[in-house]
Amino acid sequence: MAITTLIPAYKVRYLEEVLVSLKHQSLRPERIIISDDSPDRAFITAFQADEIKSAAQGLDVEVIEGPRAGGLANCRHLLDVWNGATPLVHLLFDDDIIYPEFYSIHAAAHESGMFDCSVSRRWTALESGQPVSQLERPRMVAQHPQRLMSLASDTLFSLTIPGCQNWLGEYSNAVINREAANLIMETQMAGVSYEGLGDIGLFLAASLKKPVCYINDPLGFFRTHAQQVSQQTSGHAFKLAVLAWAALAVAGYRIGKLSQEQAAQCFQMVSDTLLRGYKDVPEMVRFSSLLRELAAGVPSSEEKFVQHWHAFVPGTSGE
């Protein structure tokens, strides 16, 4: 099955490595679109260099201007340009690397028509690219004897949200079809935005239509470095990611995929995290208080949380 690679690009430092990893795929992408979101057109300029031209040789690469309105806007911009031109699409962040069989294994999983979304294991690597660890998987996943697992929504929600456990990863280690791609344009479930955890939200939302295929092999790596959102704990994007767990729990409870006890476990964990990390930030303390009320089942607490949450998420106030 044909795949398009979409690269929402901001850091040009790893461009050559990314292109080399794409060139060595056993199933090469049909097209690669790089959206240059850097402030100085760094990626457009980079393609004038001989080493980048050499790395891209044999690949169909197009570099376009990014919207410069944040990471999610850049992903959506790329999806608009792709416009469903191939059956499958892959959002590959500019600092992550995929291994040679990534596309062939993901495409084989999609051939059955059973899945809209496939997710593979990944290594966590140092900035140098040396793998050093991986996300801790739930026991039932880690001990499963098969390489490919079909995960229904009930299983996926219960293994992910109550413990705020991201064992799945992000867009870079997932391949989706046109149906799942539409979910990235929405970023909401049951009337609740899950911006901040768009990748986890996508996997969960996709599972409501078809099971998600989990590929129990590490087929790439997530590169860690100081410029990542996960390292900027005082930034708005990091706060969004923390609070989005509670938003997903509200959505999961509304659609019957989480019990009250499972949702309450998530609310309490997020509340505790906010008190530990943001005890001097009044806005976060307010959210912590709302989440404790949610965990205790206080009437109208859900509506209050969603109202405050949507006022906190860019572009959703008043929903």
Image: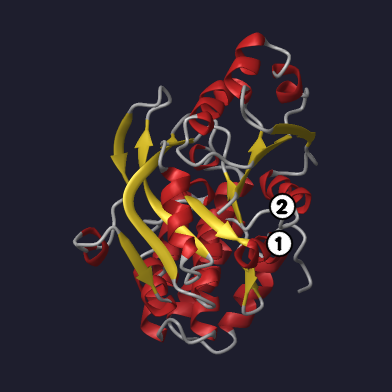
Q: Residue furthest bottom?
A: 299
Q: Position of residue 284 (x, y in %)?
A: 56, 58
Callouts 2 and 1 close, C-beta under 8 Å: yes
Tag 1's secondary structure?
Answer: helix
Q: Give coordinates of residue 24: x percent, y percent.
A: 47, 30
> Residue at the location (51% across, 45% down)?
172
- Check the picture and name the quadrant holding the C terminus: bottom right
Residue 116 position, x and y percent, is 54, 66
On screen, residue 38 versus residue 169, left or right, reads right
Residue 3 vertical position relative to residue 253 in the rendered view, above or below = above
Mark 2 crowd level (few <14, some 14–19, many ≥20, 10 Å Cα): many
Q: On the rendered image, what quadrant is the N terminus found in?
A: bottom right
Question: Is 161 placed above or below 102 here?
Answer: below
Residue 275 in view, yes or no: no
Task: Return the residue at label 2.
Answer: 79
Examine the image and state in which quarter residue 83 appears.
bottom right
What residue would you read off at disc 1?
185
Give residue 248's mark: none
